[in-house]
Image: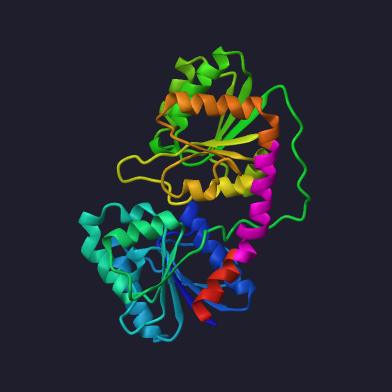
Amino acid sequence: MKIKIITQNFPPRIGGIQNVMYSLANNFSDLGHDVHVIPDHYYPGNNKFKITNLYFPKLLRPIAKKMYLTFLNDKNHLVFCDTWKSVKAVPKKYKNIVVFAHGQEYLNDKKNKYRISKSLAKSKFLIASSNYTLNLIKKSWDISNLNAKVIYPTYHIKKIKNIYKPKKNNERINFISVCRIEKRKGLFQSLKSLKVVLNEGYDFKWDIIGDGPYLKTLINETSKLNLEKNIRFHGRMDKYTDIEKSLKKSDIFLMPTFQDNNSIEGFGLSYIEAAKYGVPSIAGNTGGASEAVINNKTGWCVDACNKENLINTIIESINNSNKRKDYGSSAFKRFQEELNSNIVTNQLIDFIIK
């Protein structure tokens, strides 16, 4: 099968959608498909797939891509678009368009309603990252012309051969967060809750991996609360293997996300990256987070803005080693059986070529 990937999100930029599109290019290539990626930015290095970098200012990139695709005249090829925004770069004669939907790009529907409608009308398939995302789209747009399906976007998370081993009980619990540091991740709420937890006599360490617009503010708040001995900021880790090493050493993944205006977690890939190593999560109860983490089975889903609820959940996660083991085991099993990259990639291919 010949595949085009039209994307605004691709390495060397870092992020969830970038991981999704890069992994799809590799996975499709591994399955023997002819893959051609047309990104927004230069991507260096040798690849299993063909890549064409078009050097144009941002406003001209969709036009340049459309002209290039028109010149290629591969109208029968399957075209994957990272979001509805990339669909406008595809010429009308291309009919086999697959558009991915992640979540928050559909929240600002008043501003983009017409543009989104136009992109969805051009597409043949819609792949939503969660049931939350699909239901969000259905509320504002008619997608009766589309073949729509929810496939959790864990295309980059490979299955491991190791047999799950419950973590040993430690006197000190190791929390970890891996994310872009922004308001909706619930890190500020977690910080204040952990101060209360510490005052009540519980010991912990919290590793925070990532950067973002609120990193300095979070560091300052940590200092004000005198939590520097308990919290370690690692910044951005460019090597995924380094992140995996940190996850393996952790007891609980902490990221109780919530909706912040038009910003929300469409799914939450980091929860599944933790589940790969049997680490249960404390997640939010909004958006798609409650699909990435199943409440009272693979972790806890809480309202981060309810301080008492968050504090009680953190204390329970520290005190109840049996729940940590059960939730971690369930998270690992679910990943191995339902969410590893081979399974979701094959689900995607089977749905499109059925």
Q: Residue at x 46, y 41 (%)?
A: 180
Quarter of the figure that contains the N terminus: bottom right
Quarter location, residue 217 = top left
Residue 331 magenta-drawn?
yes
Report the front residue among 217 and 300: 300
Specify the quadrant of the image occupied by residue 94: bottom left
Picture coordinates of residue 187, whole percent (x, y): 47, 32
Q: Is residue 3 visible?
A: yes
Q: Main secondary structure of the magenta part?
A: helix
Question: What residue span does the magenta drawing correspond to?
Answer: 325-343
Q: Is residue 114 above or below residue 243?
A: below
Q: Position of residue 224 (x, y in %)?
A: 45, 15
Name the residue at 25% across, 56% down: 109
Between residues 5 and 173, which one lies in front from this camera angle? 173
Q: Residue 323 at what x, y percent from top left? A: 66, 35
Q: What residue do we see at 70% from left, 37% from top?
A: 325
Which x, y percent locates residue 316? 60, 27
Q: Residue furthest front?
A: 296
